[in-house]
Image (cartoon, rainbow, N blue to C red):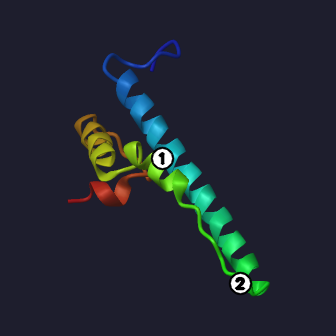
Amino acid sequence: MSQNTLPEGYQEESERISRYITGINEILYEIDAMLNQLTNDISKEDIPSVNIGLLNEKSDVVNGREQKKIEDFLESKDIDTKAFKDSLKK
């Protein structure tokens, strides 16, 4: 990067990666909140309810197809990252 700009061809993929990572973080946060609520409900002997709406909402951003596109881009540009390191091994 020079002068705080992305090289040509990187903008679209950087946005895809950002959406994907943000989506994963949102899903993980929601799962954590659901598990906490589930634990609280069980400890009160309430019947737990689980709302998995966010998981469905994020399925267009966080899925195997999007991950594959990101991995292909990273591999084509020889970009090494811990975020996708295990999935890039062949």
Observer-nearest residue: 68 or 30?
Answer: 30
Q: CA distance from mark 2 to mark 1?
A: 27 Å
Label drawn at residue 57: 1
Q: Residue at x 33, y 47 (%)?
A: 67
Among the two numbered marks 2 and 1 on one chain, the one whose residue lies closer to the N terminus: 2
Q: Quadrant of residue 47?
A: bottom right
Label drawn at residue 42: 2
Category of crowding for the residue at label 1, using alpha-carbon neighbours closer than 10 angstroms: few (below 14), some (14–19), many (at least 20) = few
Question: Is 90 placed above or below 60 here?
Answer: below
Label drawn at residue 16: none
Observer-nearest residue: 76 or 47?
Answer: 47
Q: Quadrant of residue 20?
A: top left
Observer-nearest residue: 18 or 36?
Answer: 36
Q: Position of residue 9 (x, y in %)?
A: 31, 20
Type of the residue with mark 1 = Glu
Quadrant in which the C terminus appears: bottom left
Q: Residue at x 36, y 45 (%)?
A: 80
Question: Is 9 placed above or below 66 here?
Answer: above
Q: Position of residue 55 (x, y in %)?
A: 49, 55
